[in-house]
Image (cartoon, rainbow, N blue to C red):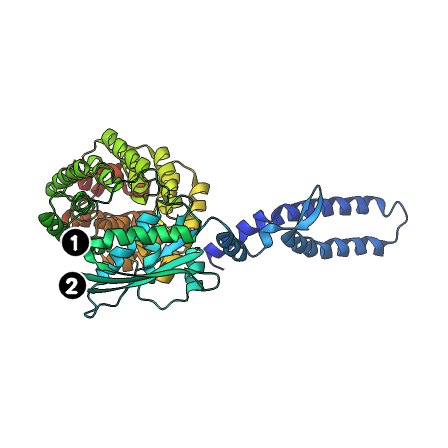
Amino acid sequence: MSTLRSKKLWSQLKKRKVVRVALAYIFVGWVILQIGEVTFEGLGIPPWAFTLVIVLVLLGFPIALVLSWAYEITPEGIHKDPAGQNESTGDTEDYQKGAPSIAVLPFDDLSEKGDQAYFCEGMAEEILTALCKVANLRVASRFAAFQFSGKQTDIREIGKKLRVQTVLEGSVRRSGNNLRITAQLINTSDGFHLWSNQYDRKLSDIFEIQEEIAGSIATALSLSLKRKHKPTQQQVDPKAYDFFLRGLGYFAQHTTQDNVYARQMFNQAIDIEPEFGRAWAGIAYTYGFAYMYFNASEVNLEQAKRTSAKALKLAPDLAESHVAAGIAFCMHQDYNNAEIEFEKAIQLDPRNYEAWFFFGRAKVQEGDLKRALKLFDHASQVRPEDFQSLLLQAQLYVSLDQKDKAMEVTLKGIERVRAVLELNPDDNRALNMGAFALLRMGEMDEAKKWMETSMQKAPMDSIVQYNGACFFSLAGAADRALDCLENCLIKVGNINREWLIHDSDIDSIRDHPRFEGIVKRFPE
C-alpha cells in the first residue's frame, strides 16, 4: 500500500473512532481474562469455560472493529456513523441545494474564418466578471470553467466537476462590426434550459450586451443584480477593446512569450485609446508577472511601477489597478504601500483571487508568515479549485513547525492538483507544485517524475526552476538543488531574495559551501 493510501486509511480509522474502540476493547478484554484466570478455578468453573472466554474475546475483536467503522456510540444510543457515508454523494446534494452557482464557458466561435476564439473567451470572461458582482451568486473561476473549452462534455458532468447548478454557454458570429451572440443558461441537474436569447447588434454595443446577459441570468436565478460599487463601464473604441480582449487571451496562458504578446496587444489598445484604464492595468500586470516569473530586470521593475501608477490614475475603481500597484510596491520592497493597495483591491472586489494571493506572497517576503497563512486561506476559498494557495500554506506551516497542519493542507492540495490535471494533463504549474505534495506524502517516484517533467516544459520559468531547487533540497539532493539555484540566477535571471531568506524548503542547503556564494550574487 502506498504511503498516501496508508495515511488516508489511518485518518479514516481515527475519524470513525476505530482506533479508540480497538484500544478500549484490548484493555477490557485483558481485564476480563485476568479476572477469569484468578476466579474461575476458585469458583470451581471447569477449565473449558476459560478457554471459551478466550475464544469469545478473540472473535469479538474484529466484530467490534466492523461495528465501530459503520456505527457511532453516543450517550443517546448507537447511530449510523456519518463519516462512513458516501461523501461524494453528500457533496453532490450540497452544491445542488445550496446558494445559486454558475460556470461561464467560453462561447463557441461561429465566425466564417473561425478566428474569433480570443473574442469568444473575452466575451465569456467579461460576463463572468459581471456575474461576480451579483450578490449571493457563486461563480466558478475562469481558470476552472475554461478548462472545458473545446471539449464535448455533458453539462451534467461539468456541473459535478465544477460543483455548480447552472452553466452559461453560447456562440459568437462576427462579421466586421456586426455581431450575432446567442446565450443559454442550462440547469446541470437535468440539462434543461432556464433561459436563452439572441442578440443581433453592432460591435460598439458589446458592453450593453454583456450587461444585459448578466442581468437576464440574475433574473432567471431570482437574484438581484446588486453591487457595492457600480462604476460605469468605460466606453472605448471597439478596435481598442478588441485588442484588449486579445491581450487577456494571451495573458491567461502565463508563458514568457504569451506575456510579451499580451503586452503588445494592450499597448495597441492604448495607442487607439490612450485613456483606457483597464488596458494600462493589463500592461502593469505583464511587467509585474515578467519580473516575478521570468526576468527580474530593472526595466520590468520600473515599468511595473510606472504603468500601475497610470492605471490607478485612470481607473481608481478597478480592483486590478490596485493589485498591479500592490505587486509593483512589493517588488520595490515598499510593503506598507503594497498592503494599502491590496486591501483597497479587496475592498473593491472581495472575490478577486489575485488580490488575496499576491497579498499573501507580499507578506511572505516581508516575513509575516502568520498573516500570509490567513491571506492564502482566503485565496483558497475565493477560488475553490486553486491548489497553489493551499500548497504554499503547507510550506509556511512547516516553517512555523506545525507539521500536522502542513500535512492536512497538503492532502487537500493534492486532491485539487489531481482534479486540475484530470481536466488538463498539461497544466505545468499543477505538475510543479503537485510534486511537493507527493514528496511530503512519501510518493517519491511520482514526485520526481512530475518535477522533472515540469522543469523540462518550462526551462525559462524562474518559479518552476526555483521550485526545482526547493524540491531537490527537500529530497536530500543538495548538489542538484544548488545547480537549480545557479540556473535561476545565470540562465533564468530571477529569484526573489526576500522569499529565499524565509523559505524553509531550502533549509537543508543553507550551510552548504556553495549556498552563500550563490546568495551573494542575487540582486539586493
Residue visible at 47% across and 48% down? 99
Residue visible at 43% across and 55% down? 164
**Can I make out residue 254 in this image?**
no
State the residue in front, 353 or 82: 353
Q: Return the residue found at the far top.
A: 336
State the residue in front, 417 or 47: 417
**Image position of 158 with respect to 241: above or below:** below
Quarter residue 311 falls in: top left
Other residues around mark 2 within 10 Å, as few (<14) / some (14–19) / many (≥20)? few
Other residues around mark 1 within 10 Å, as few (<14) / some (14–19) / many (≥20)? some
> x, y (%) of residue 476?
33, 49
Q: Secondary structure at mark 2?
A: loop
Looking at marks 1 and 2 on the same chain, the residue that comes earlier in the sequence is marked by: 2
> x, y (%) of residue 96?
49, 55
Q: Quadrant of the C terminus?
A: top left
**Three-letter amino acid code of the residue under disc 1:** Pro
Residue 257 is left or right of residue 32, and the answer is left
Give the alpha-carbon distance from disc 1 to disc 2, as whole Å: 11 Å
Residue 367 is left or right of residue 523, and the answer is right
Which residue was labeled with disc 1?
A: 238
> x, y (%) of residue 121?
26, 58
Which residue was labeled with disc 2?
A: 176
Residue visible at 17% across and 55% down? 242
**Three-letter amino acid code of the residue under disc 2:** Gly
Residue visible at 73% across and 48% down? 29
**Image position of 457 with respect to 296: above or below:** below
> x, y (%) of residue 34?
77, 45
